[in-house]
Amino acid sequence: MSKIVSIGTAVPEYRHEQQKIFEFMSRVYAINETEKRKLKFLYRHSGIQTRYSVLDDYSLPASEWKFFIPTENLEPFPSIEKRMKSFRENAAPLSLKAIDDCLVNFKDQTITHLITVSCTGMSAPGLDLELIELLNLPATTWRTSINFMGCYAAIHALKLADAICKSDPSANVLIVCVELCTLHFQKKYNADNISSGILFSDGAAAILVTGNKEAEGLNIDHFYSSVSFKSKQEMVWELSSSGFLLTLSGYIPELIEEDFNGIVGECLKGTGLSKEEITHWCIHPGGKKILEAVHNSLEFTNGQLQHCYDVLNEYGNMSSPTILFVLKRIQQDLNKNKCNNIFGAAFGPGLTIETFVLSA
């Protein structure tokens, strides 16, 4: 049985109040007062107070912008080359902060495998090789990258780590998720760009998975995934010359509410657990409406998703690292005097739902 023994998290240095980001967005969209009031309402009711970015522009007056050009039409608008350059400059240092947090009590742990995860930046040689060099890992270290899977990618990485540890009990797998979503702001005023501008932020998380049965940690018990092909165009992530473009349908919460309870039931069939035996719910806080949809689908009363709401409030949606921010809080909150069963789920392009069950 493989185990999660440690989780580390990190955010960039620039912390932005949601109000400041609204002011930035309303300025660059150049919208009228009616549209500005509508936008302000959406920001106020987003369930987010603060977000983090590798860019400080979002809280600065236009005259002090560094990444964006302070012209009336923002031209020349940042190209994909400029955005990827910023990703290369910032992704590894932020990843190292998360790794240091993860390995603070495991400095002598031998890392045998490295899995890097991102959907907001790519290059070759990539982040995996850069981290191997920065961490002074052997050049023979087994490594792979998971790219462009979106918010559920951390669970996919966890599935891969679990398979590695089951085949090699001596394995110690380090997973590193880093997303710099705020590099991909788009200036066109439409529903997709408004949604992403309200929700997304930057962050990193690292997680150590071992095949050592004697180690203390969270037992990885089960995975289950489902793809709704009828809804595959409701969440789309594509490359363009001006960065990555997100399609984020307003119907996604509706679809999740309709299907989620059934998916939980299917997942739990493989564990022998009932829904009532789940002590902690680790749901990816993709947005306030998504958490409300899960709450409604599972007929929760109150408080079961508090860690999820708290992470959303403090950090926004960081894509793949976000669920690990939630899981870290749950791990710190466990009652060691009783059995703990954790159900996790995240959503992404497809429309894909990935789930896991952990125990401690």
Image (spheres, helix red, strand yellow):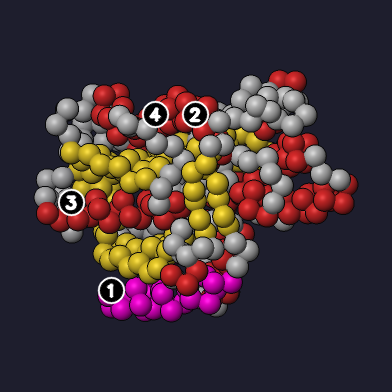
State the mark number for residue 92.
4
The type of residue carrying mark 1 is: Thr
The type of residue carrying mark 3 is: Ile
| In the displayed structure image, the side of residue 33 where residue 110 appears, left or right | left
Local SS, label 2? helix
Q: Which of marks 3 and 1 is in front?
A: 3
Q: How far apart are marks 3 and 1 (CA)?
A: 21 Å
Most common SS among magenta residues: helix
Local SS, label 1? loop
The type of residue carrying mark 4 is: Ala
Q: Position of residue 113 (x, y in %)?
A: 20, 40
Local SS, label 3? helix
Residue bounds of the magenta highlight? 254-281
Nearer the observer, 18 or 233: 233
Pointer 3 residue? 164
Nearer the observer, 72 or 132: 72
Pointer 2 residue? 81
Image quadrant where one finds the N terminus? bottom left
- Asked which quadrant contains residue 224, the reply is bottom left
